[in-house]
Image (cartoon, rainbow, N blue to C red):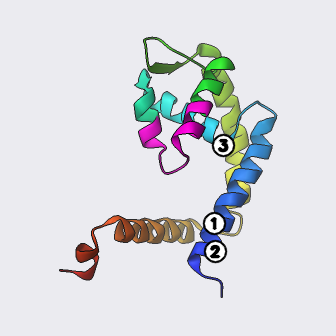
Amino acid sequence: MKPIGYWLNRTDQALTRQMNDMLDGVGLTRIAWQVLNVIQDTPRVADTEVRATLSANADIPTLTAAIDAVLVEGWATRPAPNRLSLTPEGSQRLAHVAERVDMFRKRATAGISQDEYGTAVRVLGRMTRNLEAPTDAVRGQ
């Protein structure tokens, strides 16, 4: 049996590759789509907040490039310096993309029950918290 790190890396690579392919037709990448979702969830969000929210997903140069891309492509605008909001067209386009993402998620989770999916997410969350905690906290000291 391959270790969990192997499957985490393979899964993330497959998710990114397949999602980038699926989003290519609308001019997005997985990370740009994630940036748009942060902007949608927090209108007038600061660039620094977008980077902090997505820091586990990409490095700062990649996130900055994704922010720049959604601005250039008209998905988002700057209502104030260093703030981001979706444009009306960006909101409409993102709603259209949601249909594609829903189909993608169904494909990715085919044959996986909601209970199995929930268990996987909870276990990975616990592993992450264990590894991000100070060493003494994990040992119970």
Residue located beneath label 1 in the image: 9
Mark 1 or 3, closer to the camera: 1
- The kind of residue on which mark 2 rests is Tyr
Determine if the magenta segment contains residue 9: no
- Lower position in the chain sequence, tag 1 or tag 3: 1
Do callouts 1 and 2 mark residues in contact (Cβ within 8 Å)? yes
Percent across and percent down for residue 34 are 57, 39
Horizontal side, residue 78 vs residue 134: left or right: right
Q: Which residue is mark 2?
A: 6
The location of residue 19, given as percent across then percent down, is 72, 47
Q: Can the viewer see residue 74?
A: no
Distance from Cα at disc 3 to Cα at disc 2: 21 Å
Residues under numbered marks 1 and 3 in contact, where contact means CB atoms less than 8 Å apart: no
Work out whether 6 lies above or below 81: below
Q: Which residue is mark 3?
A: 30
Give the image location of residue 57, x and y in percent: 54, 49
Marks 1 and 3, Cα distance to the nearest angstrom? 16 Å
Amino acid bearing label 1: Asn
Magenta-highlighted residues: 51-65
Membership of 63 in magenta stretch: yes
Dividing the picture into quadrants, the one containing residue 13 is bottom right
Camera-nearest residue between 83 and 65? 65
Considering depth in this image, is 19 or 102 the residue closer to the camera?
A: 19
Residue at the far bottom: name it.
1
In the rendered structure, which disc, 3 or 2, sits on the residue that comes first in sequence?
2
Please report the residue visible at 65 percent of the width from the left and 88 percent of the height from the top.
1
Q: Residue furthest left?
A: 141
Image quadrant containing the C terminus: bottom left
What crowding class fits label 3: few (fewer than 14 Cα within 10 Å), some (14-19), or many (20 or more)?
Answer: many
Dot 1: within a 10 Å radius of its alpha carbon, few (fewer than 14), some, or many (20 or more) residues?
few
